[in-house]
Image (cartoon, rainbow, N blue to C red):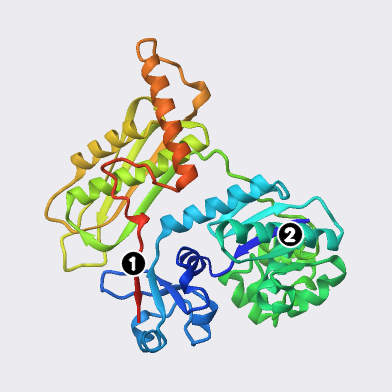
Amino acid sequence: MIIHIDCNTFFASCEVAFHPELYGKPVVVSNTNEAGGCVILALTPEAKRLGLKRGNPVFQVRKIIHDNGVVMFNANHGKYRDTSKHIMQAVVKQDIIQKFVQYSIDEFFGEIPVDDETEVRHYVSLVKDLIKKETDIPVSCGCSQTYTLAKTATWFAKHYDGYKGICVLSEANREKALARLPIGDVWGIGRSYARFMADNSISTALDFANMSETYVQHYLKIGGLRTWRELHGIRAIEIERGDVQKSLSHSQTFAYMTDDKQRLRELTADFVSRLAYKLRAQNSMCKSVTLFFRTNRHRLDMPQYSANDSRTLSAPTQDTRVITDAALQLLDQLFRPGFMYKKLGVVLADFVPATAQQLDLFNADNDRKSKKLMKALDDINNRFGEQTIHSALSANDNKHSSMEQG
């Protein structure tokens, strides 16, 4: 069976896990923006019971937050990535789930080579308990014959307390479940299909599944057809581990604009550090680095400037230091004072396998030292968390989050 694991209110659950004194209390996580406002991104069940919702502008619900002592955190994506990585490592080490893949920062898929519902539930409960023990993150789990049906099972695990966080959706119960699932909650049915569904009086997953295959293929094309087949228990989607990417990028749109070149240098070093780690994880080396940045194009009252350029490295590398030097040279070349910058990004490209490296006779010793140093850096960060060891120049802002209480 396919298993889908979904972390409950992930960002908020991470903050509670790091601050256990907040367990059972209303907690929200928000972003920030340049105008000083913010929007709720995640919240605990206790916060939801107060009437707060994801997407609420904080200024509109400030009284509820203040009057009920709601604790609010600024989103700390580095912390959340570390927790997600910890979940991956723990489940892989447990070795119950096969072909375990991270689908997003808070969702995972895998396979359990068992069909008996009782056995499946037993194994899933072991995985669920392990995640809670290792990370203190509550998860909901769904199992069924296809990826879409597994996601459907997770929907029931989340919405019905009687499942206790685990729903195994069998073929016998599939039609009954689809009749209760709103069409808007079917995985793969996005906004592009919403009008079509409404115009054709399709309100549940079962309504959609009862349409003819020819009709679906004609009007909803290949994407809709795959979803339709998955709802019928026919595997039509494959999710595979993306082990080798052809390029890697990291960018950030700043909450607050900056004209500080040193700040941009720190962020550039931080971005390169993260990308080089991923590069080594897939056993690749890059031959080029690109840097880009721009001002806020929506601020027509301010002068505008954008720039990007690439640099070809003298030899393929996965050494953070070499790539950082090249990126900073690009920054020095492109930076113009007098502008307020809103976005910065780094792209690594032109990959070759690390096993294909042609060693320079005169630099072989340096190459060995570089690999040894990078391996030591990665081992420490894998054990203690992303960016535990990083470039001295790196901003490394993600190691701390701010917390306020209304």
Above/below status of 119 relative to 51: above
The residue to which callout 1 is attached is 402
* Disc marking residue 227: none
Q: Quadrant of residue 401?
A: bottom left
Residue at coordinates 27% horizontally, 34% vertically from top-left? 325
Given residues 139 and 61, the one toward you in this image is 139
Q: Residue furthest front?
A: 21
Q: Is residue 381 visible?
A: yes
Mark 1 / mark 2, whichever is N-terminal: 2
Above/below status of 358 relative to 20: above
Q: Residue furthest top?
A: 361
Q: Quadrant of the N terminus?
A: bottom right
Residue at coordinates 20% horizontally, 54% vertically from top-left? 305
Q: Is residue 145 visible?
A: no
Above/below status of 348 relative to 294: above
Given residues 49 and 289, the one toward you in this image is 49
Residue 84 % position (x, y): 53, 55
Residue 280 % position (x, y): 47, 35
Q: State yes or no: discs 1 and 2 in contact (Cβ < 8 Å).
A: no
Callout 1 secondary element? loop
Callout 2 secondary element? helix
Mark 1 Cα shell of 10 Å, populated few (<14), some (14-19), many (≥20): few
Residue at coordinates 75% horizontally, 62% vertically from top-left? 143
Q: Quadrant of residue 308?
A: top left
From the viewer's perspective, tell me whether residue 162 is left or right of residue 53: right
The amino acid pointed to by label 1 is Ser
From the viewer's perspective, tell me whether residue 14 is left or right of residue 239: left
Residue at coordinates 23% horizontally, 36% vertically from top-left? 329
The amino acid pointed to by label 2 is Val
The residue to which callout 2 is attached is 124
From the viewer's perspective, tell me whether residue 207 is left or right of residue 159: right
